[in-house]
């Protein structure tokens, strides 16, 4: 695979992430629900990090806060030296366009656009040159070179997931946040995608993958485990980092 996917025209510069005392609470009727509780997390540049935990542990909330899709109830978040908790709407809009890319669990594809147009949209928003050519190349890298003219409703769930991944890669942004990126994929394609994400970190990006699949955490540089909104463990894989080819699920 080409390690330069999503980096042409922009340096693949890693970006440090710092969360200090971050909390996120929601009101549900008369009840306060704590999704994240006093989280301290520091991620170095050029890292491949897996955030592991069951449903409801706070994984997606953590990703949304890092990507400025949500705001913390308390604490501070800094990415690339920018305090996004203190940023205004225009600054946050620019931050989302130029710094972070998402792979959403629900895909979030535009139903009226083809696979190629969905990926090109992401590249256009990020200000990439030759967005159309880049979109076609990235779709080829995720194994969809023959599906570029198909609309989302003509694609399987796994194919839609790969389009979403291609769109995130095509932005070239230095932080890649992926929420269950292999959840709709068969094992063979899932391994392919994890290998591609691993290569993005090796090429200089900061990559965070959220999953409940403990097997996937074996390929990470670092595994952060959440339970009930708190970090309960943080470190390298217990048996050492495995190659993507060694995974089984």
Image (tube, grey):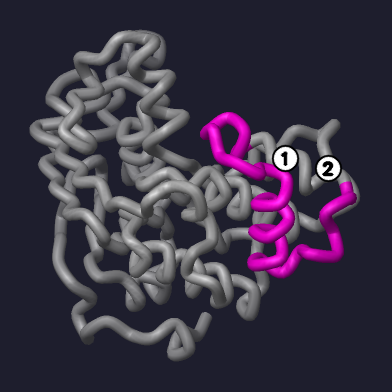
Instruction: Report the side of 162 relative to 195 (left or right).
Output: right
Camera-side residue: 125 or 109? 125
Residues packed near mark 1 inside 10 Å, few (<14), some (14 to 19) or many (20 plus): many
Q: Which residue is mark 2?
A: 114
Q: Residue at x 9, y 32 (%)?
A: 21
- Magenta part of the protein: which range? 122-150
What is the x, y in percent for residue 109?
A: 70, 38
Q: Which residue is mark 1?
A: 118
Where 112 sits versus 183, above or below? above
Secondary element at image label 2: loop
Camera-side residue: 94 or 131? 131
Residue 76 image label: none
Q: CA distance from mark 2 to mark 1?
A: 6 Å
Name the quadrant of the N terminus: bottom right
Where 8 sits versus 32, above or below? below
Secondary element at image label 1: helix
What is the x, y in percent for residue 195?
A: 49, 74
What is the x, y in percent for residue 186?
A: 67, 72
Residue 53 visible? The answer is no
Quadrant in which residue 89 is drawn: top left
Tag 2 near tag 1, CB within 8 Å: yes
The question of residue 240 being in magenta is answered with no
Residue 181 visible? The answer is yes
Q: Residue at x 42, y 33 (%)?
A: 98
């Amino acid at each position: 695979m080409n390690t330069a996917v999503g980096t042409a025209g922009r340096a693949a510069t890693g970006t440090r992430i710092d969360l200090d005392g971050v909390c996120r609470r929601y009101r549900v009727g008369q009840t306060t629900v704590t999704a994240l509780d006093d989280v301290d997390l520091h991620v170095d540049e050029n890292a491949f990090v897996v955030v592991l935990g069951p449903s409801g542990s706070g994984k997606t909330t953590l990703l949304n806060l890092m990507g400025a899709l949500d705001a913390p109830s308390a604490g501070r978040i800094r990415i690339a030296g920018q305090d996004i908790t203190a940023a205004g709407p225009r600054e946050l809009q620019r931050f989302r366009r130029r710094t972070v890319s998402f792979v959403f669990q629900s895909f979030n594809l535009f139903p009226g656009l083809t696979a190629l147009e969905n990926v090109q949209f992401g590249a256009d928003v990020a200000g990439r040159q030759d967005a159309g050519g880049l979109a076609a190349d990235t779709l080829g890298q995720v194994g969809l070179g023959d599906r570029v003219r198909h609309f989302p409703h003509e694609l399987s769930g796994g194919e839609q997931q790969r389009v979403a991944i291609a769109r995130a890669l095509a932005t070239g942004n230095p932080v890649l946040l992926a929420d269950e990126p292999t959840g709709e994929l068969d094992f063979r394609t899932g391994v392919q995608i994890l290998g591609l994400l691993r290569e993005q970190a090796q090429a200089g990006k900061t990559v965070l993958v959220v999953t409940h699949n403990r097997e996937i955490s074996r390929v990470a540089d670092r595994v952060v485990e959440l339970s009930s909104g708190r970090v309960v463990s943080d470190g390298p894989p217990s048996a050492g980092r495995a190659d993507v080819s060694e995974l089984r699920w």
